[in-house]
Amino acid sequence: MSLKYFKIGEVAEMLNTTVRTIRYYEEEGLLLPNRTDGGTRLYSEHHVARLKAILQLADNGFSLDVIGLIGSTRETCSTGDESSKKVTEVIDSAISEIEEKISHLNTLKSDLKASRKLVAKCKGCSKKPSSKGCPECQVNQNLGKIEALNLIWE
């Protein structure tokens, strides 16, 4: 059974990314494809799966340092026990980072929902939508409480 290899353009198309992005991750040491004698990059299914994981982490705001740490910690260990401990620490740190981001996103979501609710009250209003044009507006009264309103309103 022979392994199937893909050229860089095929991988980029499969993963909906760019050739430049794949080359960048290679330059950063996150991905090491096979090469022909002529220098053509060849990616196995394992490379494609690894790149997919890299893209998922990068798309969700993880730094290249963290991605590299996740991808290389195991190979720096001499035993399975050591590997288990170190990889678990790295993963736990990534999970904490995700939980913090979720908390921030939930706060933002609540802010935007509250903003939408207040702005909807302006429906049918003929006054200029600003602090000066409508000083008694509920949007104005909540500018200090809902951060997103400060972007929307003024």
Image (cartoon, rainbow, N blue to C red):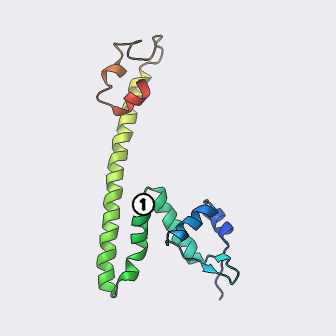
The x and y percentages for residue 136 are 34, 13
Q: Quadrant of residue 46?
A: bottom right
Going by the picture, which residue comes out furthest to the right?
38
The x and y percentages for residue 20 are 61, 62
Q: Nearer the viewer, residue 65 or 127?
A: 65
Q: Amino acid at mark 1?
A: Ser
134 to the left or right of 54 = left
**Residue designated by label 1:** 63
At x 38%, y 16%, the residue is 131
Whether residue 135 is situated above or below residue 142 in the rendered picture: above
Which quarter of the image is occupied by the C terminus? top left
Q: Quadrant of residue 79?
A: bottom left
Whether residue 106 is situated above or below residue 86 in the rendered picture: above
Which quarter of the image is occupied by the N terminus? bottom right
At x 44%, y 17%, the residue is 129
Q: Quadrant of residue 51?
A: bottom right
The x and y percentages for residue 148 are 38, 33
